Amino acid sequence: MPEPTQITVPPHLLPSDGRFGCGPSKVRDAQVRALVEAGTSVLGTSHRQAPVKSLVRRIRSGLTDLFDAPEGYEVVLGNGGSSAFWDVATLCLVRERAQHAAFGEFGAKFATATTRAPFLEPSQVVTAPPGSVALPELADGVDVYAWPHNETSTGAMAPVRRVPGSREQGALTLVDATSGAGALPVDLAETDVYYFAPQKVFGSDGGLWVAILSPDAVARLEEIESGDRWVPEFLSLQAALTNSRLDQTLNTPSVSTLVTFAEQVDWLNEQGGLAWSSARSATSARTLYAWAESREWATPFVTRPEDRSTVVGTVDLDESIDATQVIAALRANGILDVFPYRKLGRNQLRIGMFPAIEPTDVELLTQSIDFVVDALA
Ligand SMILES: *Cc1c(COP(=O)(O)O)cnc(C)c1O
C-alpha cells in the first residue's frame, strides 16, 4: 500500500479550491480583496467612528434583508463567538428553566451551560443519538426551548418551528444557527433568538456572535437584567443591544472580521438571498449524498434523508478503508479539513458545503476521494 502522502491526484480531478472545512471555512477572494481595500481607510481606525460603525450598520441591515426579519426583530452583535452567547443566553434569557434538544456536541454544550447555572432550575434535555435529530417537547415550567438548526458535529439538521403551545406558555425559542444561518431556509417568526457566528456560512473569522432578537426576547432580557440576578457587563445582552442600536459593540471588535462579514452578507443578498444560497448548498448536498449512496464503501452517516444537512455532510467509510489515510492523502493534494468532528470518533469524512463552495468543487471532491480510495487499495 502506498504512503497516503505519496498519492498524487490528477489535476483534472482536483477542486478549484481545496477548503471544505466546517469553520473556519472558505473565504472568497472578493472578501480578501475587500480587506485589502479597507486597508488604510477602515483597518486600524476607531470602532466608535463612522467608517467602522457603517460596517456594523451594513451587517445589521444586510442580515435583516437576508433573513427577511419580521417587524420589530433586531440584529445584535457581541464579542466572543457562539460559545460566549450560550453564557449570555443562560444569564439574560432563561428565567427559571430551559429545555434543550441535544443530538450532538454543540446542542449538548448549551445544555451543559444552563444545567450548571446555580440560579436556574435543572434543565430538561431531550436527546437523540448522533446521526439523528431530537426536538423539544412542551413541558410545564419551561421558559426557554433551545436546539441547533444544524448540528455541525454530526451533520444533522433540524426543523425550526416553535413547540406548539410554547408561545401561550410565554416561553422563548432559541435556535443555534451557527453553521446553518445564511444557507438554510428559515422563518424567523418561528424563533425569538436566532444566533450564529460569522466563520461558517459567512466565510469570515471567529470571535463574534450575532443574535436576531424578537420583541419578546428583548422584553425577557429587560425583565431579567432589571432584576436581582448579577450579570457581568461583558455577558449582558442589554449592553450588547444598547451598543448594537448605535452600530457599535460593547468593546473593541475585530475590524477585519467585520469587513469580510459585511462583504459576504452583501454577496449573498446580491446573488439572490437565502433562497439562492439554500438552493446552492442543497445542490452540493445532493451530489455528495448521491455519490455516497452509490459507493459500496461509503454511507451517509445521518440515517433519515430529511435530517441530512445540506451545509455539513458526513459520510462514513467502510472499516476496510482508513479515513485518516484518505484525509492525509487529500490534504497532501491541497484538499483540506475533511476530518470528522474529533469527539465523534468515527471512520468518517465531514465536508462543508457552504454557499462559498462551488457545487462543481463538491463534485470534483467526490472524484478525488474515489481516486484516493482506489490508490490506497
Ligand atoms: C461552530 C459552532 C459553535 C461554536 O462557535 P464558536 O463561535 O466557535 O463559539 C456553536 N454551535 C454550532 C452549531 C457550531 O457549528
Image (cartoon, helix red, strand yellow):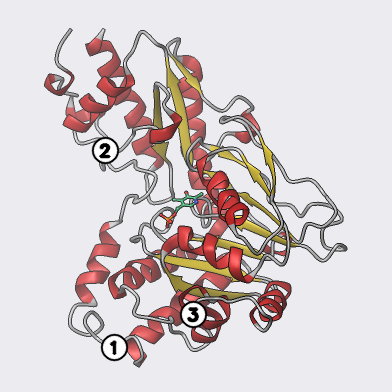
- 73 vs 206, left or right, is right
- The residue closer to the viewer here, 290 or 47, is 47
- 279 vs 358, left or right, is right
What is the number of the mark on residue 46?
1
Vertical placement of residue 286 versus 256, above or below: above
* Residue at the image position 67 percent from the left and 81 percent from the top: 222
In this orientation, does residue 197 appear? Answer: no
Please, which residue is most extreme toward the left here? Answer: 6
What is the number of the mark on residue 233?
3
Inter-mark Cα distance, 3 to 1: 21 Å
- Which quadrant holds residue 329? top left
- Between circles 3 and 1, the one closer to the viewer is 3
Q: Tell me where residue 224 appears, x and y as whole percent.
A: 68, 76
Amino acid type, label 3: Glu
Label 1 crowding class (10 Å Cα cut-off): few <14, some 14-19, many 20+? some
- The residue closer to the viewer here, 103 or 288, is 103
In this orientation, does residue 2 appear? Answer: yes
Answer yes or no: disc 1 within 8 Å of ligand 1: no
Query: Could you tell me how many numbered marks the image carries?
Result: 3
Q: Tell me where residue 188 appears, x and y as whole percent.
A: 67, 63
Residue located beneath label 2 in the image? 336
Local SS, label 1 = loop
* Residue at the image position 63 percent from the left and 65 percent from the top: 193
Label 2 crowding class (10 Å Cα cut-off): few <14, some 14-19, many 20+? some
Amino acid type, label 2: Leu
Vertical placement of residue 214 versus 18, above or below: below
Vertical placement of residue 209 versus 184, above or below: below
- Between circles 1 and 2, the one closer to the viewer is 1
- 150 vs 28, left or right, is right
**Tags 3 and 1 touching, CB below 8 Å:** no
